[in-house]
Amino acid sequence: MSTLLIATALIAVVAGICLLLISINNKQKRNAMNTFLNRLSQAGSSNNLSFSGQELLKDIAIGLDGLRRELLVLTRFKNGDYFDFTIDINNVQSCSVKKIYGFIKAGDLKNNRLEKHLEEIVLHLELYHAGSTDIPFYNHIDNRPGEAIDLENKARRWESMLNKLMNQRFDKKKSAQAIYYPSPHPGSKKKEITTAIEKQQ
């Protein structure tokens, strides 16, 4: 009887320790996420941006100012340092999600799915004047394979969001048109004033 009580007590102690460690770990994750979110907010303020959309990933955070058409990318390094830069959406030529796979040996795909060789999922931005930029959403070192689908879906949402902004830019160029104002004096010729709508906004 005493042996059973001791065993029960030991199990209770071990379970309590495990729950405490899980609670501490979750608290640390929440604190780290809040710190990361605050740094993103600070970086946005420093660049005079007001985010209409934002995303926190493993060590990458992105914020979009839709009105100013600016995308801010914040990177957190392992040593605790941060680095941020902005991308002018008007300077983005194309935006797409790219999946990067590792080396595949001959015959590997017969027994394994292609996704087993997935190494990275990035949001790839081709720029008009500065080459290209990749924003990583998934990599096989820092993320679990089970996270790939969810992170790909997030990347595709951003792809859709940025492409919509880019399409608006082109639509504004097409919508430049001539606007006629009637002359206040009957019989005189109408004046044609061409106004680019994009300049008014």
Image (tube, helix red, strand yellow):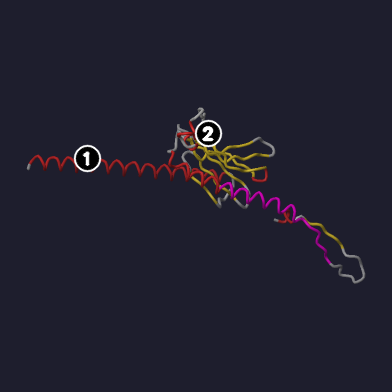
The relative height of residue 126 versus residue 190 in the rendered view (above or below) is: above
Tell me if residue 38 can be seen. Answer: no
Give the quadrant of the C terminus. bottom right
| Residue 149 colored in magenta in the image | no
User: What residue does disc 1 label?
Assistant: 14
| Residue for point 67% across, 53% down | 168
Q: Please provide the residue range marked out in magenta.
A: 158-181
Q: Find residue 72 and report its image quarter.
A: top right
What amino acid is found at the position of numbered circle 1 in the picture? Answer: Val
Looking at the image, the residue that sits furthest to the left is 1
In the rendering, at what x and y percent does residue 122 appear?
Answer: 55, 39
Question: Closer to the camera, 42 or 97?
Answer: 97
In the rendering, at what x and y percent does residue 95 appear?
Answer: 62, 43
In the rendering, at what x and y percent does residue 98 appear?
Answer: 57, 39
| Residue for point 63% across, 48% down | 163
Give SS at disc 1. Answer: helix
Q: CA distance from mark 1 to mark 2?
A: 42 Å
The relative height of residue 170 versus residue 107 in the rendered view (above or below) is: below
| Mark 1 residue crowding within 10 angstroms, few (<14) / some (14–19) / many (20+) | few
What amino acid is found at the position of numbered circle 2 in the picture? Answer: Tyr
User: What residue does disc 2 label?
Assistant: 101
Question: Closer to the camera, 36 or 53?
Answer: 53
| Residue 176 colored in magenta in the image | yes
Main SS of the magenta segment?
A: helix
Looking at the image, the residue that sits furthest to the bottom is 186
The relative height of residue 168 versus residue 17 in the rendered view (above or below) is: below
